[in-house]
Amino acid sequence: MKRKNINTGAKRRTNRCIALSAIVPALLLLMLLSACGSKKTRTADFDKLSADKLLSFFTIPSSCTLEAAEDPAEGRVIRISSSDVLFPETRSPHVFLKFKDLCHAAGAGKPDISRTPCVIFRIKAENVYDHIFQLLPLASVKEDESTRTAAVARVAKTGDWQNICVDLSGIADLSKLSIFRIGFEGFAGGDGESMLISSITFCTRAEAKKIAPAEKYELTSEAGADHSLRYLQFNIQTENGSLAPIFTRADMFRNLVDELIPDVVGTQEATDQWRWWMDNYVFNASYSRVGVPRSDEDNEGTPIYYRSDKFELVDGGTFWLSDTPDVPESKVENANYPRICTWVRLKDRQAGTEFVMFNTHLDHNGANDSTEANAVRLAQLKVIIKFARQFKGLPVFLSGDLNSSRLNSKGQLRMLYKLITGEEDFTDDTGETYSLQLSDARLTAVETVPEDRTATMTKYYDERLNGYNPAAQPIDYIFYDPENTVALSYDTFLPTRNNEYISDHLPVFAVFTLRK
């Protein structure tokens, strides 16, 4: 029996050893495959390449020079410096990078962008004025139009090393890509401007959030207290209406947003190109957008940007200023274009208060005193007033370029203005009476601009006098409901750079307190 037991135990031990000998390699293989599968991040470390080898992957530079350099903190880096930029509005320095070959040569293997669509550049700016970093993924240096989906990022002027992340997941066929065109918009040339790059990392979105977290503004409102609302109204002017390069104007706009940190922004004349720049560059990760263009052919819109870290979007959308507001591209009789109104209903995430914001751009048909033109604008405004009726009891704001002054040539209040402020109402064909009772922030804010600064268009600014035509009236407004809101301040700005205006309109900025 003892022998049997010994033999049985030996047999069991033998079977166990055979089983373990089969399982262990399988487990090791599984662990190895799992480790390989989870390690998606690939980094092209420039220290692993000689200077000549590193330079060979940066090809066909335009309006810039390249050199390999050494940085005390980062080791080997590539310095891209501007040169011979005669017309910065049409020629920006750029260089092509064979990123897959570089990554492979640096020992990281060729990246699979379909799995790791986020590209993080380790960058430092030196003497850069317009700090815009642009990445254009391409299949070849011929710049195949099928892959022309660019991404932009902002490089801080601090002179410190920073991680700049661009997300390529929106590109249809990532398998085609093997080349980046790296551009630096706004290099003026001759001032020692340069960008230093020390490494390139390919990773997932989850990994990118840890390496290069998105920039956000701090949440400032306090629960249970009256809270401020920082409101920016701005007709940004289409890119076709200004001689200034759009990237220069976008950078001025970004600086304005950084300075003011508005909670909500109502814009007009936002074309497809402008929306792209605002989505990808002007506004950071704190902001979300609502609004669609007024028509497919004419892609201007009146989008609203709001701080989604501070406010919850309860509802919102776009309607057309016509007898059929739900019908896209519809318009009132004699209007030059279909006109729209974008609106949002927002809830403060901490204070719990809600408000409604309307943002519009009324027709520019005719002069201010034209009977026909004013009839068109009145018809458009009445559509907004009817729509706003459903939000009775909530704080309501109306902003926009109304293409109408407050007073007519005889010094009398225009009907448009009186309908907004409640001095007049109107009755529709069904006998229903409608009215708004809003206040003009410029006239009622505790702190406001002096009378010689009422104009909201740059054409009324006289550089010789360093001031405005005192007779000029605003056509851009921010109206609010005085029943539940207090206007603390109202101001306008005139951002310029190199004698170029940001727009033909002035940004209008007001701060309010909403009573809970």
Image: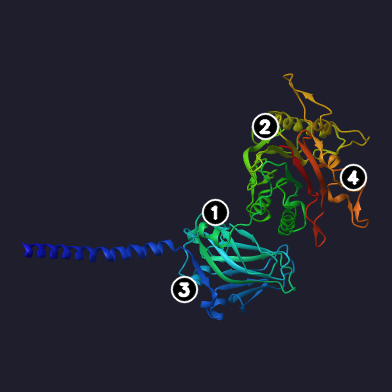
Q: What is the CA distance from the residue labelled 1 to the residue labelled 3?
A: 27 Å
Residue at position x 79%, y 47% in the image: 508
Q: Please, what secondary structure does the residue beneath circle 3 have? A: loop
Question: In the image, residue 268 lies at what x, y percent?
Answer: 73, 45
Question: In the image, residue 437 lies at what x, y percent?
Answer: 79, 31
Q: Nearer the viewer, mark 1 or mark 3?
A: 3
- The amino acid pointed to by label 1 is Gly
Residue 396, quarter of picture: top right
> Visible in this render: residue 346?
yes
The residue to which callout 4 is attached is 472
Q: Please, what secondary structure does the residue beneath circle 1 have? A: loop
Would residue 9 be found to the left or right of residue 474 on screen?
left
Q: Nearer the viewer, residue 182 or 127?
A: 127
- The amino acid pointed to by label 2 is Pro
What is the crowding at mark 3: few (fewer than 14 residues within 10 Å), some, or many (at least 20)? some
Q: In this rendering, is residue 211 above or below 440?
A: below
Quarter of the figure with the N terminus? bottom left
The residue to which callout 2 is attached is 325
Whether tag 1 and tag 2 are in contact, CB under 8 A, the answer is: no
- The amino acid pointed to by label 3 is Gly
Asked which colour scheme the image uses, the reply is rainbow
Q: What is the CA distance from the residue labelled 4 to the residue labelled 2?
A: 33 Å
Q: Please, what secondary structure does the residue beneath circle 2 have? A: loop
Residue at position x 86%, y 50% in the image: 459
Q: If you read the primary sequence from the N terminus, does the residue marked by circle 4 or circle 1 appear first? A: 1
The residue to which callout 1 is attached is 170
Q: If you read the primary sequence from the N terminus, does the residue marked by circle 3 or circle 2 appear first? A: 3
The residue to which callout 3 is attached is 107
What is the crowding at mark 1: few (fewer than 14 residues within 10 Å), some, or many (at least 20)? few
- The amino acid pointed to by label 4 is Ala
Q: What is the CA distance from the residue labelled 3 to the residue labelled 4?
A: 65 Å
Q: Residue furthest top?
A: 431
